Amino acid sequence: MTTAPMLPQRCWAKATARIALLGLGVLASVFVAEPALAELPTAVAADGAASGDYIEIGKQYFKNGLLVLGLIIATLGFIAVAAGGIAKFNEYRMGRAELGDLGVLAVVGAVVLVLMVYLLNEAATIIA
């Protein structure tokens, strides 16, 4: 058996590499030659604040920060109840807990979450 010489494959690989480098060069030159026409967005003023009243703008941002903090607290509470439910289900699956324990955790977790959301909603109403 005779084998074909490797020279054509090497030439083909070199040609492919040259074409790829040429394409990258053309693409890079297009990005360098085009001017950047992006503009920064205009800043949104806080609710109810005049355009020069920095004290009122600071108060509004502080209120918005407190509302975001309330959302973070609610999210962490939901994650904690969900993690506890998953852990209790894993214990039930392993035979270390009963199904009633899982049900009690689900009911108590739901009550805690509803109460927490209610209280945070009342706090948001008072703040805003």
Image: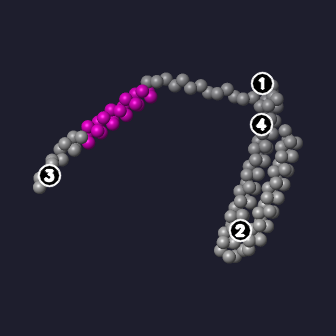
Quadrant location of the C terminus? top right
In the picture of the structure, the residue carrying the numbered disc 4 is 61
Query: Marks 4 and 2, Cα distance to the nearest angstrom?
Result: 40 Å
In the picture of the structure, the residue carrying the numbered disc 2 is 88
N-term-proximal mark, 2 vs 3: 3
Query: Marks 1 and 3, Cα distance to the nearest angstrom?
Result: 81 Å
In the rendered image, residue 23, in percent from the top left (x then y), is placed at 35, 33
N-term-proximal mark, 4 vs 1: 1
Q: Secondary structure at mark 3?
A: loop
What is the crowding at mark 3: few (fewer than 14 residues within 10 Å), some, or many (at least 20)? Answer: few
Query: Marks 2 and 3, Cα distance to the nearest angstrom?
Result: 67 Å
In the picture of the structure, the residue carrying the numbered disc 1 is 51
Q: Secondary structure at mark 2?
A: helix
* Residue 35 higher or lower than 9, as above or below: above
Q: Which mark is residue 3?
A: 3
Residue 40 placement: quadrant: top right
Magenta stretch prevailing secondary structure: helix
Mark 2 or 1: in front is: 2
